[in-house]
Image (tube, helix red, strand yellow):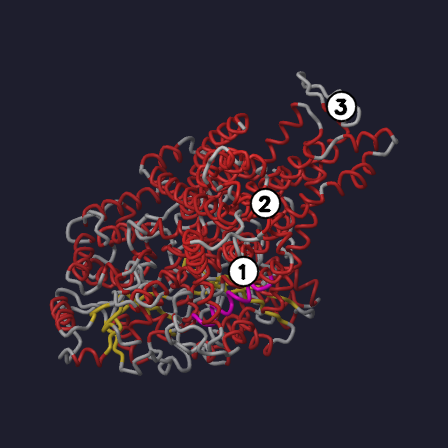
Amino acid sequence: MKGKKVTAILCAGMMAAGMLAGCGGASGSDAKASSGDAVAGGSVLTGSQASGDKYDHQAIENTKENITITMMVSGVAQGTDFETQSLPDLVHKKWPNVTLEVTKLPDDNYYTSLKTKLASGECPDIILTQPMYAGSNSCYALAEAGYLASLNDLDYLSNMPDLSAVTYDGNVVTATTGVSILGTYYNKDLFSKAGITEEPKTWDEFLADCKKLKDAGIQPIVMGDKDQYVMQFGLYQIAANEIYSKNPKYDDELRTGDTSFTDKDTWDKVLTMYKQLYDEGYIDASQSLGYGASQAIQDFIDGKAAMTFDGSFNAAALTATGEGGDFERGYFPIPSESGEQYTATCLAAGYSIYAKSKYVDQCKEIFDYWMNGDNEIWDAQLATGRVIPLYGKGADSIPNYDLFKPFIDLTNEGKGFHWCNQAWPAGTETTMEEMFSEMIGGQGTTVDDITKGMQDKFEDLLDD
Amino acid sequence: MARNRKSDREKEQYMKMSPKVLILYIVIIAFCILVIAPLVIVFSSSLRRPDNQASPLHLFIEFSGASYIRAWTQMNFPVELLNSFMTTGIAVLVIVFFSTMAAWPIGRIKTKVARFFYYFFISGLIIPSQMVIVPIAQTFNRFNIPNTRFTPVIMFITCSLPFSVFLFSGFMKSVPAEIEESAYMDGASLWKRFSTVVFPLLKPATVSVVITQGMWIWNDYFYPMVFISKQAQYSLPVGMLQFLGDKENPAQWNVLFAACVLCALPLIVIFMLLQKQFINGIAAGAVKG
Amino acid sequence: MKARRKKRSGANTSLTFNNKMFAFMIPALAMFLIFWIYPLLQLFYYSVTNFNGINYNYEFVGMKNFVKIFDNGTILNSIGITLIYAAVTVVLSNILGLALAIVLNTKIRFKGFFRTASYFPALFSAIVVGFIWSYVYMPSSGMIASLINLFGGNGASFNPLGNFHTALFAIALVEVWKGFGTTMIIYLAGLQTVDESVLEAGRIDGCNEWQLTRLVKLPMISSTITINVVLSVINGLKAFDYSFIMTNGGPGKSTKTLMFQIYEIAFTDQKMGRASAFSVVSFAVIIAITIVMLIFMNKREVEV
């Protein structure tokens, strides 16, 4: 479930990034869409054929009757929700004959629902998917099974620098417009109260700052480890510093057997470093294991703890005003031992089109409009503060842009690394979280047990 | 002493106060308070404005409908309520009909075949639906049954059959067969015998099935969660799921609690109105079955 | 009367209750076969394949899935957790339900109120109950933690769902809270069938109330007891809701019941084949336990 939660979170992040998938790239779908058009519109065929590989950019206009496009995403609806309210309204405003029906489900239910809908052939036209292998809605897994339409003919793609994490077998299958960041939110007021004047530059400085906070009677870090997926937020930052910066191919080599989780100075080091925070009481395991993720967020915004590891997708919640009034936030990547800066920043989750959808081209038309970087849908999505787009109007004025800027810069310098669970078969990270909880919960589990458990699970999951 | 007490009891409705009885009262009252305390707090908090974060232990310090209004709109309450009623109503109706029909031969015919079917049906009691959900979804696909608001109803009916057949056939044994025999002598057709003689006799068991299965269906979130994808078709518990990701956000507790109350309210009202039938129905379900 | 006479042979010789009646079984049987038995058979089939729940190009892998689930111990862990969960809920809800029923079966005032109050939690959907108890158990600011704070304790250290040793019992308690009222009502109905004259005879023999309960009432409602126990055992073995809603199976693996583990293998690990193997084994475990219970129940009924 933790895996699913993470996935969901990733999804939320991706939605934030607001990409859309085009429809019907696959030749099969094209044919289908065309014949549909022929029935509906009469004279469309020529246009489609003329454009060759291109999808029908007038698909919706050529569909005379009213159509209903279904869409399913994960997350929790808030206030005026983008996916369930603004998006359908704006699409309907642009194309009065299109009704977009959006269902938003909590993460776990999203995965269950998606799987059964795929099994029953009732998949919504548009679904939320995650890069690479992450979660039950991994775009690689779904594409491999032939469920996702190729989006190669979407015009918006030219805006995106690198889409390899959502490209399967040469086809872009997920439309994503931005990135998601994992970092460390901190409370500047509490930092200065403890006499800390600047962000830590090395792991040792980071530990020293934690100690200063603790000595000043301030809880240094709060985490909601009852939702075990949050452990990834800290661990992946450390992994970016200590593993991927040294061997960016580490995860690929796991699959070929050239590396192993049990290799010295890889995950054992990451886990030992993270464990240090619990051993020193900088994160209080006896409390965190019973704390939910949103409770930890609440403690942070109430000023009860100085830091929390979390993602850009939760920025809105983390910058809300809590009980103790407002304070200034900062956001930094956990520093590495060497002092060199890296970040766990990767492509955000995005939207895919179900290959057997009746409206592949129509969906693509919507995606291209939405993601062209300058229209009402784009603006509405940016306003949610849950996307960090890599292009388009207002990309540098999104909420909390100042917090994210250093991460985006690092990523552009090639110092951003994918989140580990994206490269692992879903379930590996669950074992990591479980065994890590056992370790900090005093169950006698050791770091070596965890790396061995991860390796076993990894091999087991790959083994069909 | 025992004898005296007996005659006392006949004169008086209630036990006489004595230290022992007083302690009994104190214990049982304390216990009941313990049991309903979470519900009282939920109700009290639901009456606060969403941003009132005072300790929920200060009961009933504010009376506002603001949290309810937000929960009402967030859940789309009237639609979900109607969906819940429709789903439950249709499912229960069909269950009673199908399972009385099935229970009739099973309860009356004394052969190994009938016995086999009895065990065949009740074996379904012990298999949880989480286990078979993906094959079930594929089955719907194979038979080209689209996902509509009635898809979960099909599963509710199927999953209720074991218990209902079990209960009706058990109850059938306590109904004298002579009545049917005289109908048979009068030359009534099977259908007529079933509809005019057997079915009315099963009324107590029917009440029991309607209540136990109705409650289960009303409260179940699993099948609707899996099979319904349109918000307009959500039932109340599925609507509640929308709050799941938010469950520990303290700022949202009051709204969540208001939603909890709204979700439970219809059943509470029905329970209050039909308390006797509920209690008897549940008891009959277990004891007679 | 002839019709009711028990037949040794399998043949049905009753005229009143002839085999034509089986036609009435068709609608129920059809639904049951199509939507329950058929998927179940598919499940058995998947248990020997590497189906991942998404990709339908799967292969036959023999007994590999079964070997795996025993190999890494997940199934034994889940069976243990499920049995503990079931034992706690069965024992607590039956003791509470029975004790309360005995008290409410006396001439006590406000009987209706007490009965309603204890039954009330049963009206709520598991999802609502999960929300309510997430709040009750929340460290620092939850209901119990606030009460501890109120009396000068440290509510922040009260953390039942975050502790490896208490989380399972904490969610089992939620199940008890929701379920004991139903158990109580069934016991109450059983107690009401106890003949007053038998009790009177006991009183004449000088039994006190406790002896009457232990020596007369309990034996007379033994079939009710077994029914209640069987129902709560079946319910306990199906445990899923509160692990799903309240703990996500954590901390660690400490609340991963059988059903939760199956759900997780199928939906997180995407190993539908292995989840099916898991289901098949769970199915065998549940059936074995149920058969033992049924034998026990039949024996008790004979005694009564």
Q: Can residue B155 be spotted in the picture?
A: no
Q: Which quadrant would the C terminus of chain C be assigned to in this image?
A: top right
Given residues A326 and C33, the one toward you in this image is A326
**Residue designated by label 1:** B238
Q: CA distance from mark 1 to mark 3?
A: 52 Å
Given residues B84 and A182, the one toward you in this image is B84
Given residues C12 and B41, the one toward you in this image is B41
Q: What secondary structure is found at the residue carrying circle 1? A: helix
Kind of residue at badge 3: Met
Residue at 71%, 41% in the rendered image: B202
- As drawn, the residue found furthest toward the top would be C9
Q: Which mark is residue B283?
A: 2
Kind of residue at badge 1: Val
Q: Chain of mark 1?
A: B
Q: Which residues are magenta?
A: B253-266
- Mark 2 crowd level (few <14, some 14–19, many ≥20, 10 Å Cα): many
